[in-house]
Image (cartoon, coloured by chain):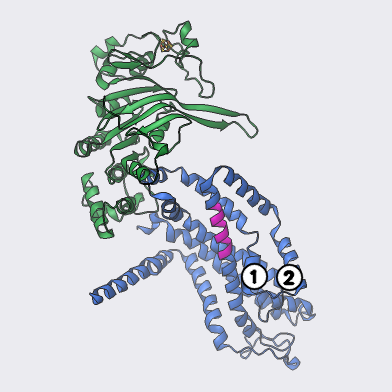
Amino acid sequence: MSTPLIETIHTSKIFEVRKGLLGVKRHIRAVDDVSLNIQENEIVALVGESGCGKSTLGRLMLALLKPDEGQVKFRDKDIWSLKGEEFKEFRRSAQLIPQDPYSTLNPMKKVISALYPQLLKYKIASNRSEARKMSAELLEMVGLSPPEDFLNRYPCRLSGGQMQRISIARALSVKPSFIVADEAVSMLDASLRIEILDILLNLRKKFSTAYLFITHDLAIARYFAAGERIAIMYLGNIVEVGDTEEVIQNPMHPYTKALIMSVPVPDPKLAKERGLPPLRSLEIPSLVELPSGCKFHTRCPYAEKICEEKMPELREVKNRLVACHLY
Amino acid sequence: MEGKTKRSIVGIMLSAVRAWIYEPLTLLATDKRAVAGFLIVLFYVGLAVIGPMVVPLDLTPNLERAYLPPSLEHPLGTDPWGRDIFAQLVHGAPDMLVVAFLAGLVTVLIGTVVGIFSGYSGGTVDLIVMTITDIVLTIPGFPLLMVIAAFLIGSGIEVNIFMAAALLSITSWAGLARAVRSQILSIKKEPYIEVSQTLGLGKLHIIFSEIMPNILPYIVMNLILSMIGALYSYVGLMALGLLPYRPGNWGAMMHMAMAVSGTVTGVGSWYVLAPAAAVTILQIGLVLFSNGVDKIFNPRLREK
Ligand code: SF4
């Protein structure tokens, strides 16, 4: 395998929380010893329930958060050791498409202000009028036409779908090589989702951008990362990584199985293969008091003694990575 | 070539006038109360700018004309020394407005800078700055002003308008600093700020281009409210005789009125009522005007 575009190496992020006014400080391991790599022009769908740390992992990869343990490397260089021009280049190369379209644009600023500052900053446009022309082209690229109608509008006069298109145009404006799309379509109407996903997929063909596509929705991950990889996250750990279709058709990790079972899929073949005994508990453990050993053992129907004692490592099993003592 | 640049400069100026004067005024026009406030404030500004040139002020005592009731010659009557009250009010207006505006400006400037700095820095810096702010907040403002003013008078230092403005904003910035900080804390977490970060647009861009537009309406509103507060304190200190006497100053007029018995017996009531009314009407004008600020800045209303 060639050098990954971006990778986390045993990366952890620990947050401090304080309960009550005089409460004791507690630590939350939002991301716990995660090693994940993304190749150039590759899509990795990151799937997990809310609060599992997938957004935090995305923000670590964008240098919005600094890891407490481990490293994040971009083209084989620790992003926190980059200086000056190199860091500027990283900032240009890695972009974010946030979840909530309604807060993704500054409510006090016209649409054009979301596009032209970066065009000037990175000298993609040499002056304001060129930046304006490019902004219009960007809007056309995401299907907003005529662009003149949108450039001078305030976000309050746009629909959720239009805002998300602008958010995409903004991320692509600097021609990044890597984009973190954090639940980019989950707040949109179901009818709009496929449309927005198709825009992203088409533009990816054009720009060969790599994606970390964060979602809680397996169906959306299956659509967006078809033929690419999927990573399943549970309470700060990556528990399974593999080809999207293989993992969904034939999940190995008990948590992946449970996750897939919870999605009603009208596919008899799939339903049959889902033979998973019921979970021992439906309760997701608190992040403050994580279970020992395998974090899934409180719910896992296959849990044995070793699962409580020893944390399973992510190991290669049949062309796939799985973190479970069963394999 | 030159003609072209000239035209574009005129064009820029025209669009600036449109964006900064014409459009805000049309928005303001939709709110009757704000219009009333705007007109009152405008009247006072006119009074302060043109008034002193038109109305002569003669401060030579002439006891034969003392306590005259309002007449055509003396629209608001005369004071215990026979001097025209209206002329004194007019000549005091520039001082009142300038000090109030400067004090408001200083208050808002300190409050905003401290609030943004503290909120944006976060961590230990935030903790230290906010602790100091809280201490300032607990100091009772007006009594402190009284003490400092008395000290200034005692030491014989001449108090100019800048000192007066600085004095009046000595504690009032703290409340605004806290409010601005808490707004920064919530805006800082907005996704569009995160995106500005990943785009590498830099701290200055984030503070001035992304955060500022969101708190600007609030700051302008506070500028007006701070002016109101400063006016109260300024008039109050003057009325108590705690700042050096300035002829025509509305507070000083009230002080003189209270110092002579005429006020108590009723013959001199114009001398105390006129400056009091002048201050009150200005305050009302400012309060009404401040209601229109939100209309001017809110893009929801602006786009219609
Ligand atoms: S390691 Fe044990 S508890 Fe964890 S998923 Fe595998 S079988 Fe279940």
B282 or B226: nearer the viewer: B226
Residue drawn at (28%, 54%), measured in percent from left and top? A151
Tell me the number on the disc at residue B116: none
- Give the amino acid at mark 2: Leu
Q: Which residue is mark 2?
A: B152
Q: Which residues are magenta?
A: B105-115
B232 or B135: nearer the viewer: B135
Examine the residues drawn in magenta and state their main secondary structure: helix
Q: Which residue is mark 1?
A: B163
Ligand 1 within 8 A of label 2's CB? no
> Few, some or many C-alpha atoms within 10 Å of disc 2 (few <14, some 14-19, many ≥20)?
some
- B214 versus A64 height, above or below: below
Q: Position of residue B233 (x, y in %)?
A: 67, 66
The chain assigned the colour green in the figure is: A
Residue extending furthest toward the top: A305
Residue drawn at (72%, 68%), measured in percent from left and top? B149
Position of residue B102 in the picture relative to residue A248 (left or right): right
